């Protein structure tokens, strides 16, 4: 997966979260899948993407 593809996926996830905040759990799942794909190919995961993942996890915990 190219870095540009990752950026596009993350941007799309953010759009979905803004448009449909009730689906933040789904966005977190998709983000985790994207991160796993990066790791599987040996590509580094950008720190800001990992930070986003942590923030989504915290948001999900608050919604429970």
Image: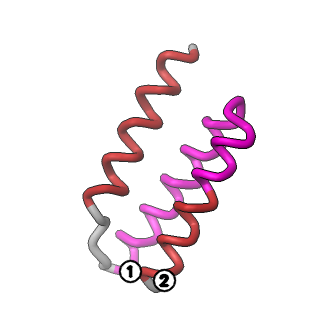
Name the quadrant containing residue 36: bottom left
Res 2 label: none
Q: Which residues are magenta?
A: 13-41
**Dot 2 lies on which element?**
loop
- Whether residue 14 sits left or right of residue 47 in the image: it is right
Callout 1–callout 2 Cβ contact below 8 Å: yes
Q: Give the residue drawn at x 56%, y 61%.
A: 11
The residue at which mark 1 appears reads as 41
Res 1 label: 2
**Dot 1 lies on which element?**
loop
**Whether residue 17 is situated above or below residue 63 in the rendered picture:** below
Residue sitting farthest toward the bottom: 2
Q: Is residue 25 magenta?
A: yes
Q: Give the residue drawn at x 64%, y 42%.
A: 17
Q: Give the residue drawn at x 41%, y 27%.
A: 58
Q: Position of residue 12 (x, y in %)?
A: 63, 61
Upstream in the sequence, badge 1 or badge 2?
A: 2
Q: Position of residue 23 (x, y in %)?
A: 70, 36
């Amino acid at each position: 997966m190219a870095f540009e593809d990752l950026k596009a996926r993350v941007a799309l996830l953010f759009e979905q979260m803004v448009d449909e905040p009730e689906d933040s759990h789904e966005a977190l799942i998709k983000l985790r899948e994207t991160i796993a794909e990066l790791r599987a190919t040996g590509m580094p995961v950008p720190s800001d993407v990992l930070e986003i993942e942590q923030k989504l996890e915290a948001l999900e915990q608050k919604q429970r």
